[in-house]
Image (cartoon, grey):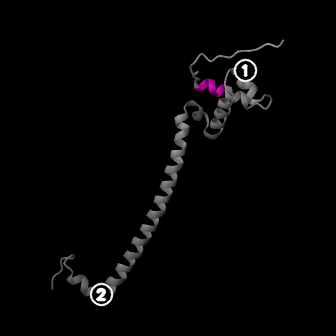
Amino acid sequence: MSEVEIISDGGRRRRWSAAEKLRIVEETLDAQESVSSVARRNGVAPNLLFRWRRLMLEGGAVAVTDDDNVTSNRLVRHLEERVRELERQLGRKTLEAEILQEALVKSGAKKPTLLARSPLTGGSR
C-alpha cells in the first residue's frame, strides 16, 4: 500500500510577510531546484509562487509586499501615456501661439494706423 498525505488548509488564507515572500522567491531563482519543489517545501501553492516570482521580476521587492502596488503600475503607465499626450498637445498649442504671435507682429507692422485707433490701446485720434 502507498501512503496518502492529506493536506488541509484550516479554512482560511495564510498571510505571508514580505520577508517570507522574498526569501521563498529568492530560493526559486537558483537554477538547481524547480519552482514547484520550492513551493511544496515551503507550503505555498505553485501558482502563487509563480505569481510572486513574476511580480518580483517585474516590479522588484516592492511588488511582492502588496498586490495593490503592482496593480497601480498599470495606472502609472496609463498616467504616463496621458502626460505624453498632454505634452504633445501643449507643444502643438505653443507652436500655434508662436505662429499667431508672429502673424500679429507682421500684420501690425503693415497697418500701424489700426493700432493707434484701437480702443484697446487707449489711443484716440
Residue type indicated by callout 2:
Lys
* Residue sticking out furthest to the right: 1
Q: Secondary structure at mark 2?
A: loop
How far apart in space, not on screen, are marks 2 and 1 (Cα)? 87 Å
Vertical order, 12 against 103 (above or below): above
Q: Quadrant of residue 31?
A: top right
Question: Residue 44 at what x, y percent from top left?
Answer: 67, 24
Q: Quadrant of residue 58?
A: top right
- Circle 2 packing at 10 Å, graded few (<14), some (14-19), many (20+), is few
Frontmost residue, 15 versus 24 = 15
Q: As drawn, is 37 to the left or to the right of 22?
A: right
* Marking on residue 11: none
Q: As drawn, is 47 to the left or to the right of 77?
A: right
Number of the front mark, 2 or 1: 1
Instruction: Read off the residue under disc 2.
Output: 111
Q: Is tag 2's residue or tag 1's residue first in the polypeptide sequence?
A: 1
Question: Residue 88 at what x, y percent from top left?
Answer: 48, 63
Discs 2, 1 touching: Cβ within 8 Å = no
Q: Is residue 71 magenta?
A: no
Instruction: Read off the residue under disc 1.
Output: 41
Residue type indicated by callout 1:
Arg
Frontmost residue, 9 versus 81 = 9
- In percent of the image, x 45 and y 68: which residue is there? 92
User: Start and end of the magenta stretch?
Assistant: 18-23
Q: Secondary structure at mark 1?
A: helix
Question: Residue 49 at what x, y percent from top left?
Answer: 67, 30
- In percent of the image, x 51 and y 51: which residue is there? 80
- Circle 1 packing at 10 Å, graded few (<14), some (14-19), many (20+), is few
